[in-house]
């Protein structure tokens, strides 16, 4: 897609530090890493958000993340890793080409602050919301 920075990276029009590539997927290091080795995994074909991903193409992305996670555990001695994916600006998406962050984690690091757990008013409220979602899906 014209003007999309990750499409340009996928086409090799601008440089990136590639860590993995196959017919459908490219993975490269994030320019501003949350921790060293932080990689981005993208479909080569432009999709703005997860809602635009072609059905059936998720498996290649998932397998790429598995490979990268496994490598990060060896290369940067990560104890764990997060796979994060933001959709739309409200959720923190800045680059509008679908991507997963694969972020190496070490025991006790403060790299990612998690959310404060909330509560439903009661079980009926929770069940009603689940019902609405199920009906919509
Ligand atoms: P988002 O907030 O959209 O989920 O994350 C976008 C990520 O892309 C950010 O972590 C940012 O550092 C990274 N990024 C933005 N532009 C470039 C670039 O040109 N090259 C690389 N390697 N990473 C980029
Ligand atoms: Zn794109």
Image: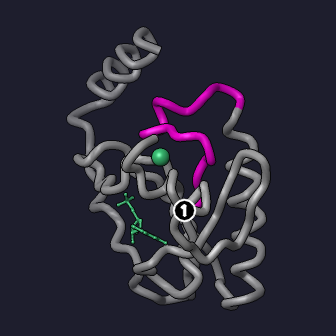
**Above or below — where is 28 with respect to 24?**
below
Tally of numbered tags: 1
Magenta-colored segment: predominant secondary structure: loop
Q: Residues within 10 Å of mark 1 (few under 14, many from 20)?
A: few
Rendering coords of residue 6 (x, y %): 48, 56
Residue found farthest to the top:
135
Rendering coords of residue 66 (x, y %): 74, 61
Residue at coordinates 45% horizontally, 80% vertically from top-left? 33
Quick check: 116 left or right of 86?
left
The question of residue 94 being in magenta is answered with no
The question of residue 46 being in magenta is answered with yes
Residue bearing the label numbered 1: 13
Residue found farthest to the front:
13
Q: Nearer the viewer, residue 13 or 74?
A: 13
Residue at coordinates 55% horizontally, 64% vertically from top-left? 40
Rendering coords of residue 1 (x, y %): 46, 41
Quick check: 19 left or right of 87?
right
**Above or below — where is 38 with respect to 66?**
below
Quick check: 129 left or right of 57?
left
Q: Report which quarter residue 75 is drawn in.
A: bottom right
The residue carrying mark 1 has its beta carbon less than 8 Å from ligand 1:
no
**Above or below — where is 74 with respect to 16?**
below
Highlighted magenta segment, given as a residue range:
41-56
Q: Report which quarter residue 24 is drawn in.
A: top right
């Amino acid at each position: 897609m014209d003007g999309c920075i990750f499409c340009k990276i996928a086409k090799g029009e601008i440089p990136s530090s590639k860590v993995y590539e196959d017919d459908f997927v490219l993975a490269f290091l994030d320019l501003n890493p949350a921790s060293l080795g932080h990689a981005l995994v993208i479909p080569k074909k432009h999709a703005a958000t997860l809602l635009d991903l072609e059905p059936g193409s998720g498996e290649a992305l998932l397998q790429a993340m598995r490979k990268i996670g496994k490598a990060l555990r060896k290369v940067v001695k990560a104890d764990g890793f997060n796979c994060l994916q933001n959709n739309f600006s409200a959720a923190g998406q800045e680059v509008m080409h679908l991507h997963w962050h694969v972020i190496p984690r070490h025991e006790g690091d403060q790299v990612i602050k998690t959310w404060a757990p909330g509560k439903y008013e009661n079980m009926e409220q929770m069940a009603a919301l689940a019902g609405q979602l199920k009906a919509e899906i």
